[in-house]
Image (spheres, grey):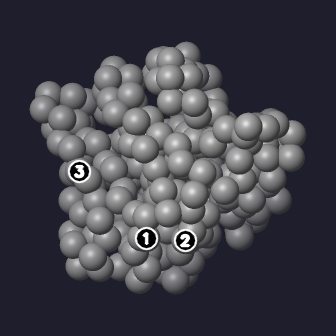
């Protein structure tokens, strides 16, 4: 039979190798019978001016948006890549069940997972995030990236802001979020509490876990990735469409 797939999106400065090497997720995925799909966080070596100058822009910092501004718009289309091109390739090349997808991410990748799921209701049966950038329109990293990739039009930013999107159209599933209580980016960059408040306003079901003493790094991710994979497995295991409801 075909296996369900869990897409994992990584954070700023990462390649596809950080999660693959550091998180220890393969064991949990194998136990659950899930395929892991782990893309890079940006295009690479495109020749785009400035793509290797900043941690929060260009290489390793695609922010899972489709850039509309020069010089980024030619290659920096990670939203389209993750939401459309990559699943099409995976599902046509491997024995992967197109009806059973989950999406998860860490930090910038948590932002990507939330935004892609919220903008494509019904496409993912399960959604979770570890320390996600939850309100990028208001955070320094998000504002720097969005102004470069999307320009200065606030309406364009809102299309990639989970705290805005969840107010408009909550998903009919429970989103799981974990955050370390000692995460140094918690207040200024991640703003998870703003997303949780938006969920309360819109009736979005969310399972939030504040983890005492943990910071933002891969010890945090590695400690709780098993819980996240089990969350996805519960929704993806069954072949019938009601599984994620």
Is 102 situated left or right of 193 in this image?
right
Q: Residue at x 57, y 68 (%)?
A: 122
- The answer for how far apart the CA atoms under marks 2 and 1 are is 6 Å
Q: Which mark is first along the chain, 1 or 3? A: 1
Q: Are marks 3 and 2 in contact (CB under 8 Å)?
A: no
Q: Which residue is mark 3?
A: 208
Residue 164 seen: no
Q: Which one is earlier in the sequence, the residue at label 2 or at label 1?
A: 2
Q: Disc 3 versus disc 2: distance between alpha carbons?
A: 21 Å
Image quarter in which the C terminus is found: bottom left
Image location of residue 224, percent across then percent down: 32, 29
Say left or right for 97 vs 33.
right
Relative to 176, say whether 193 is above or below: below
Which element carries disc 3, helix, strand or loop? strand
Question: Can you say whether 2 is above or below 21 in the image?
Answer: below
Q: Marks 3 and 1, Cα distance to the nearest angstrom?
A: 16 Å
Front one among 230 and 198: 230
Residue 233 falls left or right of residue 197: right
Q: Which corner quadrant of the image does residue 162 belong to?
A: bottom left
What residue does disc 1 label?
A: 171
């Amino acid at each position: 039979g075909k296996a369900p797939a869990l897409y994992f999106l990584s954070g700023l400065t990462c390649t596809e190798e950080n999660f693959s090497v550091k998180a220890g997720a393969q064991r949990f995925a194998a136990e659950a019978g899930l395929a892991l799909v782990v893309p890079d966080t940006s295009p690479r070596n495109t020749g785009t001016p400035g793509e290797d100058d900043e941690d929060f822009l260009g290489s390793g910092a695609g922010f899972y948006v489709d850039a509309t501004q020069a010089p980024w718009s030619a290659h920096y289309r990670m939203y389209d890549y993750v939401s459309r091109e990559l699943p099409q390739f995976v599902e046509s090349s491997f024995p992967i069940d197109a009806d059973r997808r989950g999406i998860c991410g860490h930090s910038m990748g948590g932002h990507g997972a939330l935004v892609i799921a919220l903008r494509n209701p019904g496409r993912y049966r399960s959604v979770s995030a570890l320390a996600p950038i939850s309100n990028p329109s208001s955070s320094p990293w998000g504002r720097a990236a969005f102004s470069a990739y999307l320009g200065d039009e606030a309406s364009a930013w809102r299309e990639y802001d989970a705290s805005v999107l969840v107010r408009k159209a909550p998903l009919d599933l429970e989103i799981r979020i974990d955050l370390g209580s000692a995460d140094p980016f918690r207040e200024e960059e991640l703003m998870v509490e703003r997303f949780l408040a938006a969920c309360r306003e819109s009736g979005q079901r969310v399972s939030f876990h504040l983890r005492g003493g943990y910071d933002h790094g891969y010890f945090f991710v590695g400690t709780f990735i098993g819980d996240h994979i089990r969350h996805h497995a519960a929704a993806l295991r069954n072949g019938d469409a009601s599984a994620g409801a």
